Amino acid sequence: MSDSQTNKDQQKHQQRQQKVKEQVDAKVASADKVQGIFQVITGNGKGKSTSGFGVVARCVGHGKKAVVAQFIKGMWECGERNLLEKAGVPFEVMKTGFTWETQNRETDTIAAQQTWQKAKEWLTDESIDLVLLDELTYMVSYDYIDLEEVLEAIAKRPKMQSVIITGRGAHRKLTDLADTVSEVRNVKHAFESGVKALEGFDF
Protein backbone atom coordinates (compact mmCIF):
# COMPACT_ATOMS: atom_id res chain seq x y z
CA MET A 1 0.00 0.00 0.00
CA SER A 2 1.41 3.40 -0.98
CA ASP A 3 1.97 6.23 1.47
CA SER A 4 -0.69 8.21 -0.38
CA GLN A 5 -3.30 5.48 0.07
CA THR A 6 -2.32 5.04 3.71
CA ASN A 7 -2.78 8.75 4.33
CA LYS A 8 -6.21 8.69 2.63
CA ASP A 9 -7.31 5.72 4.74
CA GLN A 10 -6.10 7.45 7.88
CA GLN A 11 -7.94 10.62 6.94
CA LYS A 12 -11.20 8.72 6.34
CA HIS A 13 -10.79 6.86 9.63
CA GLN A 14 -10.14 10.10 11.47
CA GLN A 15 -13.21 11.73 9.93
CA ARG A 16 -15.42 8.78 10.91
CA GLN A 17 -14.10 8.75 14.45
CA GLN A 18 -14.55 12.51 14.73
CA LYS A 19 -18.23 12.11 13.85
CA VAL A 20 -18.56 9.36 16.45
CA LYS A 21 -16.85 11.59 19.03
CA GLU A 22 -19.22 14.47 18.27
CA GLN A 23 -22.24 12.19 18.68
CA VAL A 24 -20.94 10.75 21.97
CA ASP A 25 -20.02 14.20 23.29
CA ALA A 26 -23.50 15.48 22.46
CA LYS A 27 -25.14 12.60 24.33
CA VAL A 28 -22.87 13.11 27.34
CA ALA A 29 -23.65 16.83 27.37
CA SER A 30 -27.41 16.19 27.25
CA ALA A 31 -27.29 13.79 30.23
CA ASP A 32 -27.59 16.41 32.96
CA LYS A 33 -29.58 14.47 35.60
CA VAL A 34 -27.77 13.44 38.78
CA GLN A 35 -29.53 10.59 40.57
CA GLY A 36 -29.23 6.98 41.62
CA ILE A 37 -29.95 4.41 38.92
CA PHE A 38 -32.38 1.49 39.05
CA GLN A 39 -31.26 -1.39 36.84
CA VAL A 40 -32.92 -4.73 36.09
CA ILE A 41 -30.74 -7.56 34.78
CA THR A 42 -32.98 -10.34 33.48
CA GLY A 43 -33.18 -13.02 30.78
CA ASN A 44 -32.53 -16.76 30.57
CA GLY A 45 -28.76 -16.56 30.07
CA LYS A 46 -25.88 -17.06 32.48
CA GLY A 47 -24.26 -14.07 34.17
CA LYS A 48 -27.02 -11.95 35.68
CA SER A 49 -25.89 -12.24 39.30
CA THR A 50 -22.26 -12.06 38.22
CA SER A 51 -22.98 -8.78 36.47
CA GLY A 52 -24.68 -7.40 39.57
CA PHE A 53 -21.76 -8.41 41.78
CA GLY A 54 -19.41 -6.72 39.33
CA VAL A 55 -21.19 -3.40 39.90
CA VAL A 56 -20.98 -3.97 43.67
CA ALA A 57 -17.21 -4.43 43.32
CA ARG A 58 -16.99 -1.27 41.23
CA CYS A 59 -18.95 0.67 43.84
CA VAL A 60 -16.73 -0.54 46.68
CA GLY A 61 -13.65 0.20 44.58
CA HIS A 62 -14.67 3.85 44.56
CA GLY A 63 -14.95 3.89 48.35
CA LYS A 64 -18.74 3.82 48.31
CA LYS A 65 -21.10 1.68 50.38
CA ALA A 66 -22.86 -1.32 48.82
CA VAL A 67 -25.09 -4.01 50.34
CA VAL A 68 -26.46 -7.29 49.00
CA ALA A 69 -29.72 -9.16 49.65
CA GLN A 70 -29.35 -12.64 48.19
CA PHE A 71 -32.36 -14.82 47.36
CA ILE A 72 -32.61 -18.37 45.92
CA LYS A 73 -28.88 -19.24 45.86
CA GLY A 74 -28.22 -17.95 49.35
CA MET A 75 -27.05 -21.24 50.85
CA TRP A 76 -24.56 -21.94 48.07
CA GLU A 77 -20.88 -21.35 48.64
CA CYS A 78 -20.47 -18.10 46.74
CA GLY A 79 -17.07 -16.80 45.67
CA GLU A 80 -18.37 -13.26 45.22
CA ARG A 81 -19.81 -13.25 48.73
CA ASN A 82 -16.56 -14.61 50.19
CA LEU A 83 -14.60 -11.81 48.54
CA LEU A 84 -17.00 -8.92 49.10
CA GLU A 85 -17.60 -9.72 52.77
CA LYS A 86 -13.84 -9.38 53.27
CA ALA A 87 -14.18 -5.91 51.76
CA GLY A 88 -16.87 -5.07 54.33
CA VAL A 89 -19.97 -5.51 52.16
CA PRO A 90 -22.98 -6.55 54.29
CA PHE A 91 -25.01 -9.53 53.03
CA GLU A 92 -28.53 -10.59 53.95
CA VAL A 93 -28.95 -14.16 52.74
CA MET A 94 -32.23 -16.06 52.36
CA LYS A 95 -31.77 -19.07 54.59
CA THR A 96 -33.68 -21.73 52.63
CA GLY A 97 -31.75 -21.49 49.35
CA PHE A 98 -33.39 -23.09 46.31
CA THR A 99 -37.18 -23.30 46.60
CA TRP A 100 -37.25 -26.56 44.62
CA GLU A 101 -35.06 -28.12 47.31
CA THR A 102 -37.27 -27.13 50.27
CA GLN A 103 -40.60 -27.65 48.42
CA ASN A 104 -42.28 -25.85 51.31
CA ARG A 105 -44.11 -22.68 50.32
CA GLU A 106 -44.72 -21.47 53.87
CA THR A 107 -41.08 -21.89 54.91
CA ASP A 108 -39.84 -20.22 51.74
CA THR A 109 -42.26 -17.32 52.10
CA ILE A 110 -41.13 -16.66 55.68
CA ALA A 111 -37.47 -16.82 54.64
CA ALA A 112 -38.06 -14.50 51.68
CA GLN A 113 -39.93 -12.01 53.86
CA GLN A 114 -37.12 -11.97 56.43
CA THR A 115 -34.58 -11.13 53.76
CA TRP A 116 -36.91 -8.58 52.17
CA GLN A 117 -37.47 -6.78 55.48
CA LYS A 118 -33.74 -6.13 55.73
CA ALA A 119 -33.63 -5.04 52.11
CA LYS A 120 -36.45 -2.56 52.78
CA GLU A 121 -34.42 -1.04 55.62
CA TRP A 122 -31.49 -0.58 53.27
CA LEU A 123 -33.76 1.06 50.70
CA THR A 124 -34.45 3.88 53.17
CA ASP A 125 -30.82 4.41 54.22
CA GLU A 126 -29.23 7.47 52.60
CA SER A 127 -25.73 6.29 53.57
CA ILE A 128 -26.00 3.31 51.19
CA ASP A 129 -24.97 3.98 47.61
CA LEU A 130 -25.95 0.65 46.04
CA VAL A 131 -28.41 -2.13 46.92
CA LEU A 132 -28.17 -5.41 45.01
CA LEU A 133 -31.35 -7.51 45.21
CA ASP A 134 -30.02 -10.72 43.74
CA GLU A 135 -32.64 -13.11 42.28
CA LEU A 136 -35.53 -11.02 43.62
CA THR A 137 -37.53 -11.61 40.44
CA TYR A 138 -38.28 -15.18 41.53
CA MET A 139 -39.68 -14.00 44.87
CA VAL A 140 -42.11 -11.76 43.01
CA SER A 141 -43.03 -14.49 40.50
CA TYR A 142 -43.74 -16.99 43.30
CA ASP A 143 -45.74 -14.36 45.25
CA TYR A 144 -43.42 -14.67 48.24
CA ILE A 145 -42.93 -10.90 48.12
CA ASP A 146 -45.59 -8.43 47.00
CA LEU A 147 -44.74 -6.69 43.71
CA GLU A 148 -46.40 -3.40 44.64
CA GLU A 149 -44.44 -3.30 47.88
CA VAL A 150 -41.20 -3.71 45.94
CA LEU A 151 -42.14 -1.00 43.45
CA GLU A 152 -43.03 1.42 46.23
CA ALA A 153 -39.81 0.79 48.15
CA ILE A 154 -37.70 1.38 45.06
CA ALA A 155 -39.63 4.47 43.99
CA LYS A 156 -39.30 6.05 47.46
CA ARG A 157 -35.63 5.22 48.04
CA PRO A 158 -33.09 8.02 48.63
CA LYS A 159 -32.42 10.05 45.47
CA MET A 160 -28.75 9.11 45.11
CA GLN A 161 -29.16 5.43 45.95
CA SER A 162 -28.84 2.92 43.10
CA VAL A 163 -30.58 -0.46 42.98
CA ILE A 164 -29.96 -3.57 40.90
CA ILE A 165 -32.45 -6.43 40.65
CA THR A 166 -31.36 -9.67 38.99
CA GLY A 167 -33.20 -12.81 37.94
CA ARG A 168 -35.22 -14.41 35.16
CA GLY A 169 -38.68 -13.31 34.18
CA ALA A 170 -38.62 -9.79 35.58
CA HIS A 171 -42.17 -8.44 35.90
CA ARG A 172 -43.10 -5.81 33.32
CA LYS A 173 -43.79 -3.26 36.07
CA LEU A 174 -40.20 -3.64 37.29
CA THR A 175 -38.73 -3.12 33.84
CA ASP A 176 -41.06 -0.17 33.24
CA LEU A 177 -39.85 1.51 36.43
CA ALA A 178 -36.17 0.76 35.78
CA ASP A 179 -33.79 3.31 34.28
CA THR A 180 -31.71 0.57 32.66
CA VAL A 181 -32.79 -2.93 31.63
CA SER A 182 -30.33 -5.56 30.42
CA GLU A 183 -31.43 -8.92 29.05
CA VAL A 184 -28.92 -11.78 29.18
CA ARG A 185 -29.72 -14.29 26.42
CA ASN A 186 -28.75 -17.94 26.54
CA VAL A 187 -26.94 -19.00 23.38
CA LYS A 188 -25.13 -22.03 24.76
CA HIS A 189 -24.53 -23.39 28.28
CA ALA A 190 -22.05 -26.02 29.42
CA PHE A 191 -24.60 -27.56 31.81
CA GLU A 192 -26.76 -28.54 28.84
CA SER A 193 -23.85 -30.71 27.66
CA GLY A 194 -23.55 -32.42 31.03
CA VAL A 195 -20.70 -30.27 32.38
CA LYS A 196 -20.89 -29.77 36.15
CA ALA A 197 -20.86 -26.28 37.67
CA LEU A 198 -17.24 -25.33 38.33
CA GLU A 199 -16.10 -23.72 41.57
CA GLY A 200 -14.43 -20.41 40.86
CA PHE A 201 -16.21 -20.09 37.52
CA ASP A 202 -19.90 -20.79 38.07
CA PHE A 203 -20.06 -20.00 41.79
Image: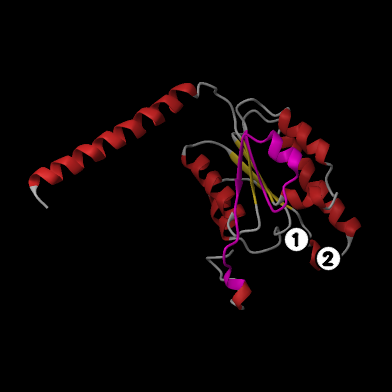
Vertical placement of residue 179 versus 114, above or below = above
Residue to which mark 1 is pinned: 97
**Element under label 2?**
helix
Label 2: few (<14), some or many (≥20) within 10 Å? Answer: few
Residue 5 lies, in percent from the top left, at 13, 45
Between residue 201 and residue 11, name the one nearer to us: 11
Task: Report if residue 110 lies within the magenta region.
Answer: no
Between marks 1 and 2, how big is the CA–CA gap?
8 Å
**Magenta segment boundaries in residue numbering:** 162-191
Q: Quadrant of the C terminus?
A: bottom right
Q: Are marks 1 and 2 in contact (CB under 8 Å)?
A: yes
Please name the residue shown 58% across and 68% down the image.
189
Q: Quadrant of residue 40?
A: top right
- First of labels 1, 2 by sequence position: 1
Between residue 154 and residue 122, name the one nearer to us: 154
- Colour logic: secondary structure
The three-letter amino acid code for the residue at tag 1 is Gly
Please name the residue shown 79% across and 60% down the image.
96
Residue 123 lies, in percent from the top left, at 70, 34
Residue to which mark 2 is pinned: 102
**Element under label 1?**
loop
Drawn side of residue 93 relative to residue 41, left or right: right
Drawn side of residue 50 relative to residue 148, left or right: left
The three-letter amino acid code for the residue at tag 2 is Thr
Please name the residue shown 72% across and 29% down the image.
155
Task: Report if residue 175 lies within the magenta region.
Answer: yes
